[in-house]
Each structure stands twice: as structure tokens, then as C-alpha cells.
Image: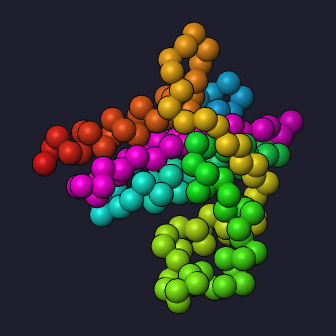
Amino acid sequence: MNKQIIDIYTDGSCNPQYKIGGWAALIFNENKKVVLQGNETETTHNRMELTAVIKSIEYVLKEIQEFKLIRIYTDSQYVERIPFRTEKLLSKNFITKGGNSLQNADLIKKLIHLIDCTNIEFIKVKAHQKASDTPNYNREVDKLSRKLVRQQINKK
């Protein structure tokens, strides 16, 4: 069996006033599309961006297993830059210049572990693109994550 390239589009959203967040991921494997999504409370935008990526990688490792590369498309520079910051983060033991624990260290550590044991490529995409005739999966996960947040706020 040929090992496949898995394409994943992720996004996260958060309403800072209510600290309610939503995340979404679209996973493409051999013309199959899987949608993952979820909500969190007491969260931030960056935590939702990280959660979308982590949950989608964990899904691939559990459900697909046979692949040669995971390509993650994200509009989050915060997430996309983590592979480039890993060495510094580890050397500083996830402590900021001010001596505080790095925000989101729990999720960043988890993502670094997944990156270390999996062949992953991050691709930065432009956020909030206008609708067009061309499929835009980043726009789709953006709309889905924002919808999840709105639904949770409306339940309050």
C-alpha cells in the first residue's frame, strides 16, 4: 500500500469576553474528508489554535496510521512557528525572560512531542479569505470554529 500524504486544515476561535473557544480541523486522506471539532471554556484563541492541530494529529496517528507526511495548513503564525522555536523553548525549560511559565506550555509540549515523532510540515495560509469559486478549506474551518463559539455563547 502506498503511504499517503495527509492534508489537514485547522483553525481555532475564542470569544475573550466569555473565554469560550471552538476549534475545527478538516482531514483529507485518499479523497476522504473527516471533520473534527470541539469547544472549550476558560480558554484563549491560541489554545484553540493549538488544540485543533494536536487533536487532528492524534486522530491521524490513531485512525490512519499509515502515511508518509502530515501537512498542516494553519493561519496561525503562533502555531506555525513552534517548530522553529522548539530548541529555544526546551533550552529555557518553557520559562519566559521574566521568569514565568510560558503560556500554553502544556499544549506546546504536547505539540513538540507529536512533531518529534511524526513527519509533519506546517504551511502558513492567509487568514479570512473572501469567498470564491475555488474550495478554501481554511475558510471552512474558520467559519466552523467561529460557529461553535457562537453556539456556546447563545446557550448562556
Q: How far across and down, in percent of the image, does residue 17 sit?
A: 24, 55
Q: How far across and down, in percent of the image, does residue 102 sit?
A: 52, 77
**Which residue reaches farthest bottom?**
99
Residue 60 highlighted magenta (yes or no): no
Q: Residue at x 55, y 36 (%)?
A: 127
Residue 6 highlighted magenta (yes or no): yes
Quadrant location of the N terminus? top right
Q: Is residue 156 visible?
A: yes
**Which residue reaches farthest front?**
98
Position above or below: 86 against 95: above
**Which residue reaches farthest left?**
156
Q: Is residue 34 visible?
A: no
Q: Residue at x 23, y 45 (%)?
A: 152
In the shown orientation, is residue 154 left or right of residue 133?
left
Bounds of the magenta segment: 1-27
Closer to the camera in the image, 52 or 84: 84
In the shown orientation, is residue 12 left or right of residue 59?
left
Position above or below: 134 against 48: above
Majority SS type along the magenta span: strand
Q: Residue at x 62, y 64 (%)?
A: 111
Position above or below: 37 against 128: below
